[in-house]
Image: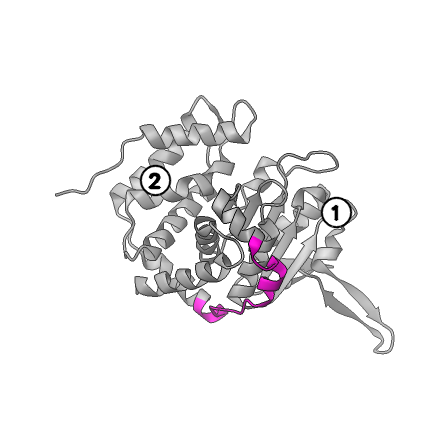
């Protein structure tokens, strides 16, 4: 494994997307981690912060086929998966693929669709296949779903249950720009114009190769024990309603490996685990108060109080 390839790959994607979304290099890097890990991203933030534009820029930068789905209450599962229609001239049924048959799928405002439609998407995310009329079709490789939702507007929405939120590898938030960054955005050409100038900077073959190599990053027993200490603390904490699942532990392990490679190392250190803990586990820790913010607060407290293993001399 050559960590320099991971560093170069990440730099190209961050620079490309950074032309559209200023000052959010860390969020872009986290999406790259998720993409290489084979996971999916839930981007949750206030309206107008650039969620959709960031995901469009990322899709253009990685190449492959891209589809955007605007989720609405009347959207049906077949609108995502596709249908078998009768071709009268040919005298037979033919399958017409839906928008999920793409490398990158943007599920815009996922919480506006009904639970039935949400389940069709989440099943595809987990199983990596789409079943229509009893016949299964594999999804494209690599495959990434990037979903957005507005956390402050609840009228006419169908919030994702905790068990379904757990299927997302990461939950990210962009937040407001700094004053100077926002002034730069105001004075430059429109983002739509800049978006048209973005071309692929990586290939799908390169992505699959690096995703396979990430598993070779070494994780010592001490670091693995530290990771599991974090998981165990979420399960025993009095401020957490539910702990992190085994799926969450696997996601954190994988994210730490990729982060280590991006930092130019062939081994994981505790700082890699801490860096990825909040975006990977934050949405998996349910707070007793019923607030996502309180759940993240409980996780931060665990990270602050838990002893970090030191390197043996």
Neighbor class of circle 2 (other Cα within 10 Å; few <14, some 14-19, many 20+) is many
Residue 291 magenta-highlighted: no
- The location of residue 173, given as percent across then percent down, is 52, 42
Farthest residue in the bottom direction?
90
Query: What residue do we see at 53% from left, 69% from top?
Result: 199
Query: What residue do we see at 79% from left, 47% from top?
Result: 74
Task: Judge left or right: residue 251 versus residue 229.
Answer: right
* Residues under numbered marks 1 and 2 in contact, where contact means CB atoms less than 8 Å apart: no
- Residue at numbered disc 1: 72
Neighbor class of circle 1 (other Cα within 10 Å; few <14, some 14-19, many 20+) is some
For the C terminus, which image quadrant?
A: top left
- Residue at numbered disc 2: 227
Q: Nearer the viewer, residue 271 or 232?
A: 271
Residue 188 magenta-highlighted: yes
- The location of residue 264, given as percent across then percent down, is 29, 58
For the N terminus, which image quadrant?
A: bottom left
Disc 1 or 2, which lies upstream in sequence?
Answer: 1
Q: Nearer the viewer, residue 71 or 152?
A: 152
Helix, strand or loop for disc 2: helix
Looking at the rendering, which quadrant does residue 227 occupy?
A: top left
Query: What residue do we see at 51% from left, 65% from top?
Result: 62
């Amino acid at each position: 494994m050559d960590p320099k390839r991971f560093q170069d790959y990440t730099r190209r994607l961050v620079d490309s997307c950074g032309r559209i979304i200023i000052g959010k290099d860390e969020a872009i890097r986290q999406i790259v981690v998720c993409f290489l890990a084979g996971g999916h991203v839930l981007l949750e933030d206030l309206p107008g912060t650039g969620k959709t534009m960031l995901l469009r820029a990322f899709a253009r930068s990685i190449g492959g086929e891209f589809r955007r789905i605007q989720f609405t209450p009347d959207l049906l599962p077949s609108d995502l998966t596709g249908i078998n229609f009768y071709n009268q001239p040919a005298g037979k049924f033919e399958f017409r693929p839906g928008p999920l048959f793409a490398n990158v799928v943007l599920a815009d405002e996922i919480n506006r669709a009904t639970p039935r439609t949400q389940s069709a998407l989440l099943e595809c995310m987990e199983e990596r296949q789409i079943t229509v009329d009893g016949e299964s079709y594999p999804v494209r490789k690599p495959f990434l779903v990037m979903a957005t939702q507005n956390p402050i507007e609840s009228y006419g929405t169908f919030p994702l249950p905790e068990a379904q939120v757990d299927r997302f590898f990461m939950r990210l938030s962009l937040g407001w720009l700094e004053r100077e960054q926002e002034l730069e955005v105001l004075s430059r050409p429109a983002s739509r114009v800049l978006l048209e100038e973005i071309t692929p900077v990586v290939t799908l073959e390169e992505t699959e190769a690096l995703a396979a190599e990430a598993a070779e990053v070494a994780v010592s027993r001490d670091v693995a024990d530290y990771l599991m200490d974090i998981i165990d603390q979420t399960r025993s904490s009095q401020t957490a309603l539910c702990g992190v699942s085994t799926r969450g532990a696997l996601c954190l392990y994988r994210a730490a490996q990729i982060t280590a490679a991006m930092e130019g190392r062939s081994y994981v250190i505790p700082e890699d685990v801490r860096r990825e803990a909040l975006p990977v586990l934050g949405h998996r820790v349910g707070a007793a108060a019923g607030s996502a913010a309180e759940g993240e607060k409980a996780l931060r407290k665990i990270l602050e109080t838990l002893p970090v293993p030191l390197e043996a001399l």
